Image (cartoon, helix red, strand yellow):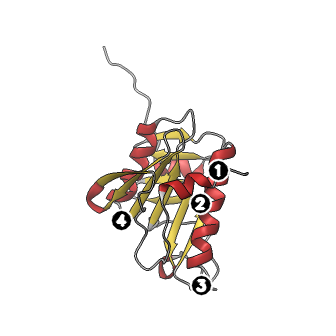
Amino acid sequence: MAIATQPQLTLDDFLKSPETEPASDFINGEIIQKPMPQGEHSLLQATLCETINGIARSKKIAYALPELRCTFGGASIVPDVAMFCWDRIPKTSSGRIANRVEIHPDWVIEILSPDQKLKKVLSKLLHCSRNGTELGWLINPEDESVLEIFPGQRVELYEAANKLPILEGIELELTVEQIFGWLSLS
């Protein structure tokens, strides 16, 4: 007796399907819809982009972009923040940013949402690391920590006053406390 199996969705099939809201990632043959961002997530995402771009964009060192679909290494992901070194920003022949990004970011930042599975987000960051991303951050607001993924998939945990590693060439110093301090509006 033969058992019928569902054909696995391909990356091409996924890319042809309508975009979801919130966005979905396609990794390891699986579609994973991202949770709807909430207050802490949105504030951290916006402030990280503003902070990185405030230093790196005007000097044409790098550009941090929120919620940008990146397709590379057999997956298509939408990091909370995708940062590209200036000379690697995908551009059209006229010099405008490309709509389709088919290369890995240099730095990927994910912010863990309350109902999000740690394993799924970590899997996405490890995929990035295996495919050329130099630095990955997994920010966990619940326990106020940052897990960093480096080349070779080396993982380090940062907390409290720990100074966070930043990509070379970006003159930025941040501690875990500073990042979570952004959440206080008082």
**Quick one: label 4, few (<14), some, or many (20+) residues within 10 Å?**
some
Residue 169 in the figure: left or right of residue 185: left
Whether the residues at callouts 4 and 1 have beta carbons within 8 Å, the answer is: no
Image quarter (top left, top right, bottom left or bottom right) of the N terminus: top left
Q: Which residue is mark 1?
A: 183
Whether the residues at callouts 1 and 2 have beta carbons within 8 Å, the answer is: no
Residue 133 can be seen in this image? no
Q: Amino acid at mark 1?
A: Leu
Q: Which residue is mark 4?
A: 132
> Which label sits in the foreground, 2 or 3?
2
Residue 70 sits above or below residue 29 on the image: below
Whether the residues at callouts 3 and 4 have beta carbons within 8 Å, the answer is: no
Q: Which residue is mark 2?
A: 68
Q: In the rendered structure, which disc, 3 or 1, sits on the residue that comes first in sequence?
A: 3
Q: Amino acid at mark 4?
A: Gly
Q: Amino acid at mark 2?
A: Leu
Q: In the rendered structure, which disc, 4 or 2, sits on the residue that comes first in sequence?
A: 2
- Residue 97 lies, in percent from the top left, at 62, 75
Q: In the rendered structure, which disc, 2 or 3, sits on the residue that comes first in sequence?
A: 2
